[in-house]
Image (cartoon, rainbow, N blue to C red):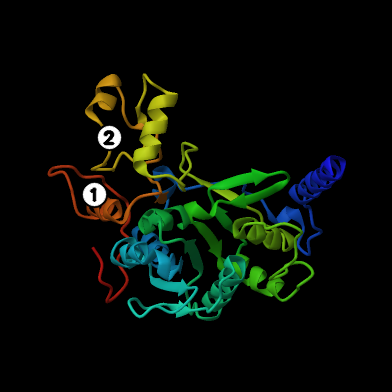
Amino acid sequence: MFMKGMIMGGIFCLVLSLLASFNPSTEHTTEDHHHHHLQAPSKDELKHFSHSQMEDLSNQVRVYCIIMVQPKILVYWAAAIHTWSKHCDKAVFYTSEASKALEAVDLNEKDDWARLRKALTHAYENAGDLRWFFVAQPTTFAIIENLKYLLLTKDPNEPFYLGNAAKSGELDYVVYDSGIVLSYEALKRLVNVFKDEDKCPERGGSLWNVGEEKQLAMCLKYTGVFAENGEDIHGKGLFNSKSVESLISDSMQANPTNVVEGCCSDMAVTFNGMSPDQMQANPTNVVEGCCSDMAVTFNGMSPDQMQVMMFGVYRLRPYGHDFHDLLIFDPPVGSDND
């Protein structure tokens, strides 16, 4: 029995290795992929645009938010409705089963990957003139205006698939917890490859359970669309799979003499869970090590912390300070927006 277990374990490891090095042939060549590290435009770049061009750009970047929910996490679902999702041009909640408490598209599907496929197909078919798609879980907090700024000069008719890019073997994928961004062209290719069960099976296509974030990357890879890391002009990631509190704490541990510089946005206002001792131990610097001041997403916050984040990002302003932003993203018409 021991030898049999050793043999089976060896076979399983071999299968994992083969799947990790998954490299399907593509209908579109890899030459389509020119931007593994995708950066937001700099202020200098924006200065080349006229006022009318800037207005046109800001009005063209409109986002369809695909928010995946389940009744068992109703409190996060409600928090997403009342906080960041109000800033999407269109926010649609997709649920595994109907809930009497909150409105959503009932996909009647328990399997995570099959449910995500159905949600993406529904969004594609009901997008209207929206050309950017943001896929998130209800535990994610997103600053949609910063997402629009990242996408400002990008063409949705090109295949973009971006967020917090990670690697598993030879497969690049975008971390689901940090939010996933797809252009119209990328989603169109994806919906088309959904129809090919050999390349992108809905169920039972693997010998082991691969998470939906990797399944998504595998299917997109077949169409010549590859994961890209969303960054600011300094190379800092914009999509975070942790909360602001966790990122500050990680920054302090990694850089005990330079804590604040690494933490988070220079426009952040309030944080929760930081002890006075932590701040006193690193009095020189508490924000540059954490995250970008143009961060798009955070994760791992409680619903109450999401409400605090909403207040800090959209409502609290220091009197006398002017950030001199070169353009404005107006809220969706008729929306209940902060």
- Secondary structure category for the residue under label 2: loop
Q: Mark 2 sits on what residue?
A: 274
Vertical arrangement, residue 47 with respect to residue 95, above or below: above
Query: Which marked residue is nearer to the observer: mark 2 or mark 1?
Result: 2
Query: Could you tell me residue 154's position as x and y percent?
Result: 52, 58
Q: Residue at x 80, y 44 (%)?
A: 9
Q: Locate the C terminus by quadrant.
A: bottom left
Query: Who's the residue at 67% across and 45% down the image?
Result: 168
Numbered mark located on residue 312 in the image: 1
Q: Quadrant of residue 219?
A: bottom right
Say whether residue 155 is visible.
Answer: no
State the residue in front, 338 or 252: 252
Residue 320 spot, x, y in % from top left: 13, 42
Q: Residue at x 43, y 79 (%)?
A: 98
Q: Residues within 10 Å of mark 2 (few under 14, many from 20)?
A: few
Residue at 47%, 48% (x, y): give it: 239
| 164 relative to 192 in the view: left or right | left
The amino acid type, in three-letter code, at marker 2 is: Met
Q: Position of residue 224 (x, y in %)?
A: 72, 59
Is residue 27 placed above or below 302 in the rendered structure?
Answer: below
Hey, what amino acid is under mark 1?
Gly
Seen in the image, is 56 located left or right of residue 129? left
Residue 209 percent location from the top left of the image? 68, 58
Disc nearer the start of the sequence (2/1)? 2
Contact flag, marks 2 and 1 (Cβ < 8 Å): no
Against 329, is 292 above or below?
Answer: above
